[in-house]
Image (spheres, grey):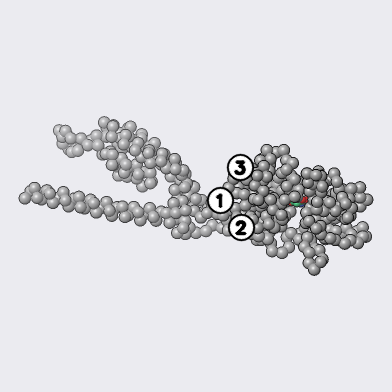
Amino acid sequence: MIEEDGKFKGFCIDILDEIAAKMNFKYTIYKVADNQYGTEDENGTWNGMIRELIEKKADLAISALTINFKRQQVVDFTKPFISLGISIIYKIPTSKKPGLFSFLNPLSLEVWIYTLVSLIMMVLARFSPYEWRNTHPCNMNNEFVENQFTAWNSLWFAVGTLMQQGSDINPKAFSTRLVGGVWWFFTLIIISSYTANLAAFLTVEKVDIPISSVEDLANQSKIGYGLFKGGSTMNFFKESRIDTYKRMWKYMQNNPDVAFVSSNKEGIDRVLARDYAYLMESTFIDFVVQRNCNLTQIGGLLDSKGYGIATQLGSPYTDDISLKILEMQEKGDIQKFYNRWWKGGGTCVRDEKKDSKANPLNVENVGGIFVVLVAGVILAIVVALFEFIYYARKNASTIRVKK
Ligand code: ASP
């Protein structure tokens, strides 16, 4: 409900106008001085709109006034005109772009380690007597034999086949061929699984969701949370016998400065300004998330209830107003008012197309493989330099000896 130049307008006013027209009455509206919906304190005294009805100062109270057990004992309620539940409003989780080395993510760290360790398995070939061959096959008297599977060659064979490139060293003995065959099968499955997962890991942005339900919120202590002080939402947590909610209520009582706010606006401002989750009725959440694209609802509804028009206890108007509400609901009037006030104006259009479209891979996505390439080339240059120096030194000493 909004007040402009002393005139009220909004969803509730549309409903009230319609009821007034149907029942043929006139009304004057005033706002309660304490700006409260109505709660009972320890002494049994009520405040807010409920108090106005108890003290018979007003005939009706219409607002986002939730029908609940305590209130129903001191005032009458009409049938609910809208249903809702408590939920969490929180900032839209930020999504992280894939990192430079996201090409490693298709396989978990363990699998990478196991794969590298299995490279060593190929050294087995050294032990087969059938891998030892005459170095000069034409000379049967030659006593020298050699094994092509030196540790270094075995590693080259294993890396070559793992990378699906093959190698010119091939096993000859039955045992080594068996190892080779099994190894090729292993590499086939590992590489296929890696390829199948790769595209997704390079492109999909990971969403950082610190909480996705009320249980997550209750089980952590980093994100502060709270609710409107003195409303039915607070009463829900106060009275609940469910463990999670009892724990949350305890936290709120121990941290009143963090937990209790004096208006929903203050709660939403906190959500926007810091790491804060606010427990609010779904009607308000729907309204806010359609107007502020940085906010979203987390998880489902914690309960299910409705807003009703409150009347004095024993009021003669309650049943008639209930009838009118049912009629308006069946005819779709209430839905019409809802659409007018909730959907109209400032609707936040979320960019859903973004995910369904295939984007080309850019440097951010595949940068890591270039890093590997450049690092490999630099390492190769350094090693080549060492090889050159080593070879030159060795030759120099031979030449010196010969002299
Ligand atoms: N609608 C609520 C009430 O009637 C306010 C709230 O607690 O969110 O008290």
> Of marks 2 and 1, which one's residue comes earlier in the chain?
1
| Residue identified by numbered label 1 | 208
Q: Residue at x 12, y 49 (%)?
A: 397
Q: Distance between the residues labelled 2 and 1?
A: 18 Å
Q: Nearer the viewer, mark 2 or mark 1?
A: 2
Crowd tier of the residue under label 2, counting other residues whose Cα lies within 10 Å: few below 14, some 14–19, many 20 or above: few
Residue 253 position in % (x across, y down): 68, 45
Q: Name the residue under label 2.
A: 273
User: Which is nearer the N-term, disc 3 or disc 1?
Assistant: 1
Specify the farthest residue to the front: 43
Q: How crowded is mark 1: few (under 14 residues within 10 Å), some or many (20 or more)?
A: few
Residue at coordinates 80% horizontally, 55% vertically from top-left?
A: 63
Q: Which of 163 and 48 is in front in this view?
A: 48
Real-space CA distance between mark 3 and mark 1, rounded to the nearest whole angstrom? 17 Å
Cβ(mark 1) to ligand 1 < 8 Å?
no
Which of the two residues, 399 or 42, is positioned nearer the viewer here?
A: 42
Answer with left or right where residue 359 lies relative to residue 171. right
Q: Can residue 24 be seen in this view?
A: yes
Q: Which amino acid does label 1 sit on?
A: Asp
Task: Name the kind of residue labelled 3 in the image.
Answer: Asn
Furthest residue to the left?
Answer: 403
Question: Which SS class for mark 1?
Answer: loop
Q: Residue at x 36, y 54 (%)?
A: 373
- Residue 391 lies left or right of residue 21; in this view the side is left
**In the rendering, which numbered label is found on residue 74?**
none
Residues at badges 2 and 1 in contact (C-beta under 8 Å)?
Answer: no
Q: Residue at x 20, y 35 (%)?
A: 145
